[in-house]
Every structure is written in C-alpha cells, then in structure tokens.
Image (cartoon, coloured by chain):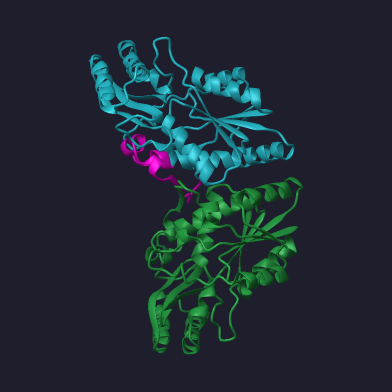
Chain colours: A green, B cyan
Amino acid sequence: MTVIRSAKQMALVARRLRAQGKAIGVVPTMGALHEGHASLIRAAAVRNDVVIVTIFVNPLQFGPSEDFARYPRPFTRDLRVARAAGAAIIFSPDAHELYPEGFQTTIDVGALARRWEGQRRSGHFRGVATVVTLLFELTQPTHAYFGQKDYQQARVIQQLVRDLHLPLTVHVLPTVREPNGLAMSSRNAYLSAQERAQAAVLYQALTLARARIRAGERRAQPLLASMRRLIRRAPQTRIDYLAIVDAVTLEPVSRLRRRMAILLAVRVGPTRLIDNLLVDVS
Amino acid sequence: MTVIRSAKQMALVARRLRAQGKAIGVVPTMGALHEGHASLIRAAAVRNDVVIVTIFVNPLQFGPSEDFARYPRPFTRDLRVARAAGAAIIFSPDAHELYPEGFQTTIDVGALARRWEGQRRSGHFRGVATVVTLLFELTQPTHAYFGQKDYQQARVIQQLVRDLHLPLTVHVLPTVREPNGLAMSSRNAYLSAQERAQAAVLYQALTLARARIRAGERRAQPLLASMRRLIRRAPQTRIDYLAIVDAVTLEPVSRLRRRMAILLAVRVGPTRLIDNLLVDVS
C-alpha cells in the first residue's frame, strides 16, 4: 500500500492508472476508519482494479464552533484498517495541498444542500461538495463509495456528479451498525458508555416508524410524534430534527408515497448524531 | 467538421480522443464568432490534434434585464468561421443538455468574481464558472483558449482551473481590434455607425493611460482622471467603471507597481462595452 501526500503526485498516479484502462474505486473519508468505512473499501475492492482511500479532515466543511480540532486522527490505525480492507493507495494530503494560498473556488449544490444538515451547519455541504470535487479530480474514480449514514451528503454528491457530468458512478452503501443498532460513526468515540446505551433509541425510533409504515400508516405527523416520544424517553437526548422526506429531493411530506427517507439528528449528551432509514411506500 | 448536440455524445467522443493520447484544444464561445474567436481557434489548431469549438449562449450568465434573448445567433455563419479557422468539432448543446430538469449545482470563484463585472452583473461569473466547468468535463481539453477582452473572465477561469486541479492549460490571447481600436465583441453588432465611431474612445483612453505610465506616471488617480476626460468627450458614452488593478487579484491600487490591468466598462448609447489593457510597471 502506498501513501501519497502530494496532490500533484496523486493526480499523476491516478491519470496513469486511468490511461492503462484501470478501474479506480475511491472511498473518500475523514479517517478514524470504522467498520462502515471498511465495508465501503471492501465493496470497492471487489469491483475495481485499484482502491484509493482518501483521508482528509476537511476544514471547509466544519463550522467555527464545530469539532474540527478534536476530530479523531488515528492515522497509523487507519492505514491498517484500509490495507486489511483492500486499499492500494492512501491519499492523505495536508490542507495546503488542496487549498493553497489564494484558493477561492467553492461548489454549491442548491436546494438539496439547504435543508436539514445544511441549515444547521452553515457552509457544510459547500465544503463537502468542494472537497469531493477536488478529490475526484485528483483521484479520477470510475466508482466512488459513500455510506448511507450521511444520507443527505450522499444525495448532494449524487447530484453534483450528475450536474457536473463527472464520469463516475456513485455507490451509496448500507449503514453499518453496532450490535445495539447505533450507526457507526467516527463521532461515536465522543460518547460515554451511558450515552452510547441511550443513543440506541435513534435506531429504535427509525425502526418503529418503519414498522408503523409497513403496518399501513401513511401520515407523517403521527409517525414523527411516536418517534419523538420514544427518543425523549432517553433522558440525555435532545432532538435537533426528525423528518420524513422524499428520498430524492429531501423535501418533507405530510403523506408518504414512493421512496421516503426518515431523517434524524439528535444530540446525545454533547454529541450530535445523525441517522436515517429508507422506506419504500407502495 | 462534426456538429455535436448531445452532452453524452460529446463526452464519449472527447474521452475516446483523450484515450488515444490526442491533445484537445477547446475554444468556449457563445457563437456570433468574429475575428477574435477565429484567432483563438487558429491558435488552438496550431498546438492541438483536435480543436473543439463550443457554441452555447449560456442562460446562467445573463441577468434578468440583460440581452440573453436578443444575443446574436448566426449559427450557419459560425460554422463557416469555425471550420475556416481549423475547428474539427462544434459542440452546440441545447440548454437542457447542460442543465437538465433538477440541475442545481453552481461554482463560485470567490473574491475575483465579486468586483467589476461581478458586482454589476449579479451571478454572472457564477454562471460562467459553472458552464465552463461543465464544458471542460464534456470536452476534456488539454488546452483551453480565451480572449483577453474579457480579462476578468479569463482570470476567473484561470483561478477555477487551478483551484479545482483541472488538468489543462488556460491560454489568454490578445484582444483583436477593429481598425479604429474598438475591441472585437459580438455585442458590437448592437452599435449604430455613430456609436461605433464614438466607441473608439475606449481604446484611446486605455492607450493614453499606457502612454502616461510609460512616461513615468505611477499614481492611479491622475491616470483615471485623464481617461475619464477623454471618454466624456464622446457625447453618447456613459462610464460604468474605470479602474487600475493588480493584474492577478484585480484589486484596485492607488500606486502602480508590477503587472497592472487597466479595466473599463462604458455604455455607448444603450450598449455596454468592456475593454482592458495590461501594463508592466517596472
């Protein structure tokens, strides 16, 4: 496995691979790799000749009061996880490699990026869209892999790839969960044992809603109300948003139809967690 | 010469050419080709295996009160001009090919795009940066050619290419002028004979400033004042802005040093014209 730090070098290597007709699978990450990332890397390895894992804690997607500085960076461990899962190249640039002096171009994915996480985390998706476009230019993926856990992010990236006519396929793979249902996230490291136990209500609320939908409920309000009640039973939780939205546009609906996403963001103690579930409503 | 209308087809052809190792020169235009465009196409033909001229009147870069509807579209004549200058492929998509239903991604080139044209024409450079990025994705240039007449646009595109790590070289070629000095522009077609004669003061003002700089003047204010006086002698002119700026940042200076751009935007009758001159100050 090769570790590349320089943007120029990465572009050179990727273009050489593409010129040789190789399929390149790219898994963009902020490091602190967990089983969710490993599952993406393994999926990429099955389908591509070369897997590139990017590890970059992107300052552009963090707000001023967010956890950029304390975001975990266990680099040596990450290398081990990536290699075991099938990565051939780690691209881990310093910030000035991607954003040199004078850098000023940003990419905005309109309405999709405004709601939910975009509304709470000002500039977040602009940072995500910008860095992902840069990483795609530098790594030249034929396939790119994202986790469903960050569902809105995945939609923003799908839209970006479509709108900019980027020549790659975006794969959004299922969320990997802890035994108690908690979605794997690098931020779970911030949870105390007690908080981690309480955080299980997020997935319980999602599956409760899904069960009621399968049983025939089509009105968003009662579904959201029952999710809210369940989550509030865990004393250290504070709901940021719960929403039932069209899975493509992310616009909220009052009556469910077609493919829906149930989205939530909840603070557990001081840690903000997000999760979601997709449900087909026939 | 081939005319391509479909974005998919264009992407396919361009990627096939690049896979064969061909150098692709791209000249993005809005059509209404004049000798300025022809000079870009000829320059592209000298250096590349294939020249693609894009013809697309980009709705995204026009303001609501601007001349999108009446912008000239002499397509058959354009084909002749492009072919004679050495174009092998014309890419002329309909708007829905570039901006299909649901399109929502835009590219913003920060500070460079805020001043001058960007300040007067809200959203203009966002439209330019977005369409140029799309056209680059679809045509895969190794070299792209722009006229110096739209100097701020050229700077925005240079910055975009650098910031997004696009693998191409941007060439900014000298403005081609009418015998009276008027910079060639598709919008010159809007001028009456009298307005066209008066429009000659734009270049006269630029060369006057250059002559005074060469004679030793280093203060922006007296230079701008003498330009203003000269332009005002033509009764149908109305100055929008005159500025002496750093040629890289486009920030105005009070004292000239290094490489400067003298920028102007002037209405002649109802038609808004821009022009500029670069001056090295040692």
Q: Residue at x 37, y 42 (%)?
A: B123
Q: Position of residue A281 (x, y in %)?
A: 52, 71
Residue B264, quarter of picture? top left
Taking A243 as reference, is B43 left or right? right
- Please identify the quadrant where the C terminus of chain B is shown: top left
Q: Residue at x 39, y 32 (%)?
A: B68
Q: Residue at x 27, y 18 (%)?
A: B231
Residue A141 part of the magenta-drawn span:
no
Residue B5, quarter of picture? top right
Span of residues in magenta: B100-126
B96 relative to A248, above or below: above
B94 relative to B279, above or below: below
- Tell me if I can see residue B76 in this picture: no
B113 relative to A263, above or below: above
Tell me how many marks there are.
0
Q: Nearer the viewer, residue A185 or A96?
A: A96
Q: Position of residue B86 (x, y in %)?
A: 63, 21
- Please identify the quadrant where the N terminus of chain B is shown: top right
Q: Position of residue A171 (x, y in %)?
A: 62, 62
Residue B121 part of the magenta-drawn span:
yes
Q: Residue at x 34, y 40 (%)?
A: B122
Q: Position of residue B174 (x, y in %)?
A: 49, 22
Q: Nearer the viewer, residue A273 or A55?
A: A55
Taking B126 as reference, is A131 left or right? right
- Tell me if I can see residue A14 in this picture: yes
Residue A50, quarter of picture? bottom right
